[in-house]
Amino acid sequence: MHNHILHFIKLTLVGLLALSACQQQGIEPSRCRDGKCRFFIKNDRTIDLRMGIRERSGILFTPPGDNRVFVYSYEEKQKRNSDQDPYTDLFAFEVDSDLESFRFTNEQLEDIQFGIWSNCDCPENLFVADSGYVSGQRIDEHFWEVLIDVSYRKYDYRESLIMKARFEER
């Protein structure tokens, strides 16, 4: 019995260390499921969601621009079918490049062009966050800590995106 308890404690500690390592790299395990996640920042860019929606081309990043664009991407490890690209999720938003911290809520999410995109065979694949908040703080020269709790209309229902992540500025 005593050995089982020690084994359980060791497994729990190993799991917590792995979880901590993922979170230190900006990776929320619930967002990375079985694939590759990246949290990064593109400087001197602008997002054009209207054209992306109109052209069904996803989130467009147009250089040059004067904003800092925060990007999350997830790519499935395995293709669903041999004739398809791997499934990809992406979200992005932009803030003024002079800011060292920010908080945007509800209607302001449109101002920062918070878009959510998936490469699916769907009638629509680009959605715009319209309620909730996103806040961020620069924590050192290369990293930002960002809290996101937004929702958006996806067809006839609402979806939510909730996460805490560390984005790397390159």
Image (cartoon, rainbow, N blue to C red):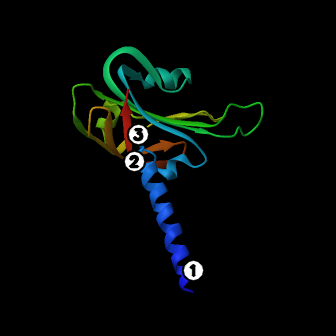
Which x, y percent locates residue 65?
33, 16
Residue drawn at point x = 21 percent, y = 25 percent: 98
For the residues carrying marks 3 and 2, which lies nearer the camera in this image?
2
Task: Give the residue drawn at x 78%, y 33%.
Answer: 82
Q: Nearer the viewer, residue 132 or 68?
A: 68
Residue 132's place in the image compared with 62, above or below, is: below
Report the side of 51 relative to 121 (left or right).
left
Of the image marks 3 and 2, the number of the one nearer the N terminus? 2
From this viewpoint, which residue is outermost toward the bottom?
1
- Residue receiving disc 2: 24
1 or 2: tag closer to the N-terminus: 1
Q: Say which residue appears at 50% left-offset and 61% top-offset.
A: 15
Q: Would you identify the image quadrant in which residue 75 lies?
A: top right
Q: Element at badge 1? A: helix
Picture coordinates of residue 61 (x, y %)?
44, 21
| Amino acid at circle 1 | His
Q: Which mark is residue 129?
A: 3
Res 163 visible: no
The CA distance from mark 3 to mark 2 is 26 Å
Percent of width and height locating residue 90: 50, 35
Of tags 1 and 3, the one toward the viewer is 1
* Among the two numbered marks 1 and 3 on one chain, the one whose residue lies closer to the N terminus: 1
Tag 3: residue type?
Answer: Ala
